[in-house]
Amino acid sequence: MDFSGVFPALTTPFAADGSVSLSDLKHNILLYNKTDLAGYVALGSTGESVLLTQTEMEGVLITVKENAAKEKKLIAGCGAESTAATIERVKRAAEIGYHVALVKTPYYYKPIYKAEAQIAHFRRVADASPIPVMLYSVPIFTGVALDPSDVATLSEHPNIMGIKDSSGNIPALAEMIAITPPGFQILVGSAATVYPSLTIGARGAILALACALPEKCAALYQLYRHGQLELAREMQNVLVRASKTFMSEMGIAGIKFVMDQRGYSGGDPRLPLLPLEEWHKKRIIGVLASVEPAAVGACSS
C-alpha cells in the first residue's frame, strides 16, 4: 500500500469533565473526510497517547476506524515501553482494521538502549505483527533517534514498510533515503521540512499542523506532486510560519486552539499539559489571520 501524501497526527478531544470525547473526535473525522488528507494517524504524540488509559485508546481507535472514509489509510500508534505490550497493541490495531502500526522507539532506559536493543525490539514486533510496521523516530520527546544505518538494517525486514522521522534533520534524512530500498516509505513529522524532504525522496508527512490546517498541508503535497514548485515553496513558507507559532511555541494546546477557531473540536489538553493563557490565544489569532489569506491565495493560483 502506498502511503504517499499528508496525514494528520490526530488530536484527542476531551469533554468538560476531562474524559475523552469520542463524539468530538467523530466530528473532526467527518470534516477531515472532505479534505485531500491521505488518511489518519491515531494515538500519536499529538494525540496525547501517553496520557490515555488503555480503554480510552481503544475508544479512539474504534471511533477513527468507524468514521473514516473508505479511501483513507489508517495508521495506529502502537508503541509501548515493553516489546510484549507493543505486540499486544499492534495485534489489537490489526483486529480493529488499521493498515499500519506506528511503533516509536522505547526510551525509558535510554542509556542502555543501544542500537542492538532497538533493532531487536523492532524486529520482534515486526515478526509478530499481522500488519506492516512503520518505525517512529521522535527524539524531541523520547531523546532517542534512529540512525540512518539502523533504519537501513531494519528496512530489510519484510514487515517493516517505512518510517516516520520527526528529527527535522535533513542531512540525516537524505542519508536514510539513499541507503534504504526504493520501496521503503519515508514520511516526515516536521511541517517546516516537508518541501525539502519531498525533493530528496520522502513520500509525504505526518503532521500535527494538519489537524488545524488540513487543506494547506495537503495542498503543499499536491502542488509539489503536480510540479508547481514555486507555489509549493510559497505554501511551505506559510506552513513554517504557522508551525513555529502553533506547534513549536504553543505545543498541542496551540494546535487545539487553532482547531477551535476553524470549526474543529480542539479544546484543552490533558494535565499535566497546560491550557493556553489569553496572551497565547491573541498571538495565535494574529498569526492565523496572516496565514489564512496567504494559504488561500497559493491554493487558488
Image (cartoon, rainbow, N blue to C red):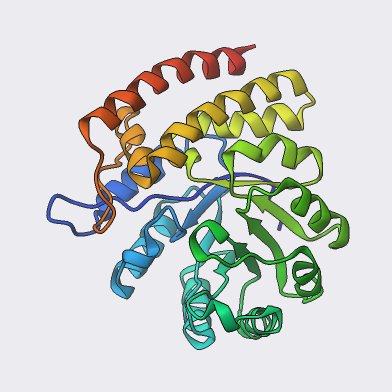
- Give the quadrant of residue 265: top left
* Frontmost residue, 213 versus 73: 213
Image location of residue 227, percent across then percent down: 80, 25
- In which quadrant is the N terminus drawn? bottom right
Q: Residue 258 versus residue 27: which sits nearer the camera?
A: 258
**Which residue is at a point 57% across and 79% down the rendered structure image?**
111
How many labels were placed on the picture? 0
Q: Is 30 above or below relative to 17?
A: above
Picture coordinates of residue 243, whole percent (x, y): 50, 35
Res. 301 in view: yes
Q: Residue at x 35, y 32 (%)?
A: 258
Which quadrant does the C terminus fall into?
top right
Nearest the eye: 280 or 261: 280
Percent coordinates x, y for residue 225 in the rendering: 75, 32
Answer whether residue 213 is visible to the viewer in this image. no
Q: Residue furthest front?
A: 111
Q: Residue at x 54, y 75 (%)?
A: 106
Nearer the observer, 146 or 48: 146
